[in-house]
Amino acid sequence: MTAVPEVLVAEHAIEYTYTRSTGPIIGAFLTGLRDKQIKGIRAIDGRVIVPPVEYDPVTSDDLHELVDVGDAGVVTTWSWNATPVAGQPLDRPFAWALVRLDGADTGMLAAVDAGDEAQMHTGMRVRARWADGRVGSIRDLLCFELEGDLA
Amino acid sequence: MRRDVAIVSWASFETPSEPARNEVEMLLPVIQEALGNVGMTQQDIGFTVSGSSDYLQGFPFAFVGALDAVGAWPPIRESHVEMDGAFALYEAVNVLQEEGIDTALVYAFARPSRGELDRTLALQLDPYAVAPLWPDARGLAGLQAQAMKDSGRYPQLLGAGHEVPPTVVADGAVAVVLAVGDRARELTKTPAWIRGIDHRIEPPALGVRDLTTSASTTAAAAKAGATGVDAAWLHVPYPHQELVLRAALSLVDQPVYSAAGPVMVGGLAQLAAAAAGVAGGKARRAVAHATSGPCLQQNLVAVLEGGDAA
Amino acid sequence: MTEPVTMVETPIRLDYSYTPGVASSRFLRSLEHGQIVGQRCPRCLKVYMPPRGACSMCGVATDEEIVLDGKGTVTTFCVTNVPSPGLTPPYVTAWIRLDGADITSMFLIQECDPAEVRLGMRVEPVWVDESERQPNLGNIRYYRPTGEPDAPYDDYKDYV
Ligand SMILES: [Zn+2]
C-alpha cells in the first residue's frame, strides 16, 4: 500500500432528542417528581423499588402498587466523580451514589453534591435538592445534598 | 447441544488508538488471518455474525458497512448483535445446531478512541431515570467497587492503590471461526470444543442488584456446566470485577487470565484466548467468560476442552 | 402543568473526532488536488469510486489506485420541481458512471436545460477554484455536458 496520507479528522456530533412515551408507571413517577414527590412501586416480595419498575425484577409479574417514599435517605454505595462530563447533573466534582430513600428498599442512582470526597461515606444521610421549573423529568431531582450523619 | 461445535481458528488486533484505518480496514486483515489459518475463504462459511455498536463509530448502520470486510457476494447468511462479539458467538453456536450449516465466522470490532466512551456507554442504560443523568461508565463501576469494599468480603480492595482506573479505551477487532464435528477435525488438529455455553442477564436497575456478587455469572456457569476447569479466561472491564467473577465461578487456585480489551471486542477476544489456551495445551478444560452492560449486568460463560469430541 | 406526564424528551449528544480511514483519506486528498482517485479490486477488477479500501463483493483489500479523469456518462437522472436549500427548481440530479469506474455516483447536472438531460449523455465535472478546494466532494460544483456524442447503451447498460 502506498504511504498513509496525513489523517483527515472531522469533528462530528450526533445529536437527537428522543420523545418517549412513559407508560403509566414511569409516567406516575415523573409526574410525582414535578410535584417534589418521589414514588416507588411494591414488588411481589414486598420490597419498595425506586424508581418504580413495570415488571417484578424476580418474577416478571406486572407491578401496580405505587408507594410514596421520602425525599431523604441513605447512601448505600458511592463513587467520586472528580471530572464531570457533559450532561451530568453537576459541573463540579460530585459523587455518584445509590440512595435508599426513606420508605424504599432499593437504591436509586443520583448525584450527591458533597463538595469533597472526604465528605462521602456509605450510610450517610442525604436529602433531595429540587430543580426550579420542573417539567416531569428525572432531572427535576437535581441532586442530593448532605443532611447529616447517622453513621 | 446436539452437534459438537469447536473454535478452530481466531485472530485479533488491539491498539490503544487506531487513528488512520477505519473499521473495515482494521477488520479485514483480522478476518483474512482467521480464515487463512484454516485454509478457508468466505465462500466456505455457512453463517456469519458480528458484534459491534454503531454508537461507537458515530454513524447509523455502520455494522452493515463492516460487511465490506467479509465479501458478502454472492449473498451470505448473516446476522448482527449490538453487543460484544461473544454474544454473537452464542448465536452462531445455536445456528450451527442446524443440519447443513457446518461452519461460522464470528467477528467484532470497535474504534471507541474516536468518541467519548464513558459517555457513549450511558446510552445502554434505562432511558427514563438513568441515562438522562449521563452516568460515566467508570462512575458506575466505582459504585460496585465501593459496595464490594463495604461488604467486608473483599479485603483485597482495601487500602490505597485500589481506585477504579479509567475505562479502558482501545480499538480493535477479533475474528473466530467455528466448525461442527468432523468438519472441525478436518480444519485443525487442535479444535477447542465448546462443551457448554450460556448467558444470563440481571435487572437494569443497579439498585435492585447485589453488585457484590454476580448471580448471572453463577447461573450461566451452572447451565454451561462450568465445573472441573483447570484455567479461566475472564472478561474484566475493571480490575475489581475479577474478584466478583472468581467468586461467582468458584475459582480457587486455577490460573486466571483477565483482560478488558476493546469494548464489544474484549469478550470474544477472551473466548479466542481460551481457545488458544486449550489448543496450545495450556489448559485441558477451560472456562471462558464475557460480559456486557454496567457492573457485569450480563454474563456469558463457555466451557472449552481440547482433545477429541466425545 | 397539572396533566399527568405521559411523554418525556431525552436529548442525546455525542461528539466524535471522525477519521474516514486510509482509502477515504487518500481519495479526499486527491480531490483537494483536483483529481479523482479510485481503487481497483485485485480479484474482480472492479474500480470503486469513492474507494473504501475493500471490495465489498470479494472481501479483499483494494490497494491499487486508479486516477480517473472525471468525465462520465449519465445512467439515470431525476428532474426535481420542488425547492431544496441552495437549489432552484427545476434542477437535475443524475447517477453518473465515471469513465473507468464500476459504480455510479450522484451529482447535479447544470449548464443544461433539464429537458436535454438523457441516459447516455456525456458529462464532465466543474471544479471550484483551486484556491477554495477542500478535501471533500464539494470541490465538484456540478457536472455539465461535454458535447461529445452520447455513449452507446452497451457501454453503460450494466450500471443502469
Ligand atoms: Zn472484488
Image: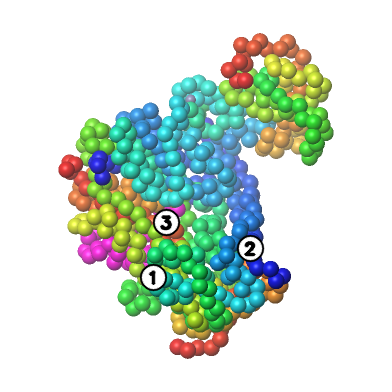
- Which amino acid is tagged 2? Thr
Q: Is residue B136 left or right of residue C76?
A: left
Is A26 drawn above or below residue B35 in the view shown? below
Judge whether residue C10 is colored magenta: no
Q: Is residue B69 left or right of residue B36?
A: right
Is B299 drawn above or below residue A96 in the view shown? above
Nearer-N-terminus badge (3/1) = 1
- Label 1 marks a residue whose chain is B
Q: Nearer the viewer, mark 2 or mark 1?
A: 2
- The residue under label 3 is B292
Q: Residue at x 37, y 44 (%)?
A: B91
Q: Secondary structure at mark 2?
A: loop
- The residue under label 1 is B210
Write the start and end of the magenta stretch as one range.
Answer: B236-263
User: How dense is the environment of label 3, judged by Cα within 10 Å: few (below 14), some, or many (20 and up)?
Assistant: many
User: How dense is the environment of label 1, judged by Cα within 10 Å: few (below 14), some, or many (20 and up)?
Assistant: few
- Label 2 marks a residue whose chain is C
Residue C60, percent from left and from top: 45, 30
User: How dense is the environment of label 2, judged by Cα within 10 Å: few (below 14), some, or many (20 and up)?
Assistant: some
Judge whether residue B261 is colored magenta: yes
How many numbered discs? 3
* Res B280 visible: no
Per the rendering, the mark at residue C35 is none
- Quadrant housing residue B233: bottom left
Q: Residue at x 44, y 50 (%)?
A: B83
- The residue under label 2 is C6
